[in-house]
Amino acid sequence: DTGVSQDPRHKITKRGQNVTFRCDPISEHNRLYWYRQTLGQGPEFLTYFQNEAQLEKSRLLSDRFSAERPKGSFSTLEIQRTEQGDSAMYLCASSPREAGGVDEQFFGPGTRLTVL
Amino acid sequence: AQKVTQAQTEISVVEKEDVTLDCVYETRDTTYYLFWYKQPPSGELVFLIRRNSFDEQNEISGRYSWNFQKSTSSFNFTITASQVVDSAVYFCALSTTSGTYKYIFGTGTRLKVLA
């Protein structure tokens, strides 16, 4: 069990460019979450997948953001036409599905995005 | 609405002192879960504890202990005999079984343990 991995760890881009991040969850986990964390704040929920189905999107996820989880394995988060306000740490987490309960989420190391 | 409040932004203690981190939550759900995570300078969130709303027993794990009180909607975290390695940002989070089990995080408390 290698844990949740994210790639890249750091991304610097110019305003207006598109960026894509990848998350590989723990292999047997069917729940996958994306969060965004800005300096001095706690992580904020962006979106949730159960297997390949995207079941919830936060209002923080504007039309410039899109996420996918093909085949219920890895997930990608794309930001189009980046803005300086998108600069943040993007965290991916996964958890197994516990019937009727809530398991702890296992977090990846995050992708730090800087938009110049 | 669901909310988690960590009123202490930053706490500094001297090594070996005990320290308590406060967490107050709001939810209308009767079934919910509370969590504590540690975020060291490396940045990766590390799970510490999960507690469900039906289990009010306090828990101790080594130097760590947690006090869950539904009457005051609090889930406080105490580190006994703090060590420099405890220096990190600590987050309290809330999740319910209605919906997608997403976490609602507090703003975190930065703990600095001085040698």
Image: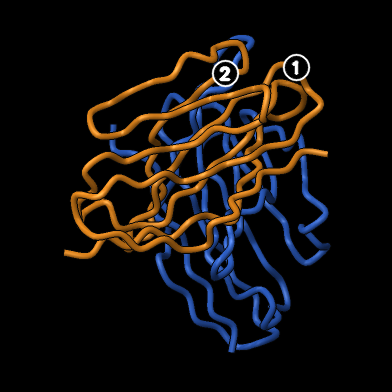
Q: In the image shown, does B5 or A47 lie closer to the viewer?
A: B5
Q: In the image shown, does A73 or B85 lie closer to the viewer?
A: B85
Q: Position of residue A48 (x, y in %)?
A: 67, 39
Q: Which chain is blue?
A: A
User: Is label 2 in a helix, a strand or a loop?
Assistant: strand
Q: Is residue A107 above or below residue A44?
A: above
Residue carrying label 2: B52
| Chain on which label 2 sits | B
Q: Is residue A81 left or right of residue B24?
A: right
Kind of residue sitting beneath label 1: Thr
- For the N terminus of chain B, the image quarter is top right
Residue carrying label 1: B30
Q: Is residue B79 left or right of residue A55?
A: left
Rendered residue at 55%/83% (across/down): A13
Q: Is residue B49 above or below residue B114?
A: above
Q: Are marks 2 and 1 on the same chain?
A: yes
Q: Position of residue A66 (x, y in %)?
A: 72, 56
Kind of residue sitting beneath label 2: Asn
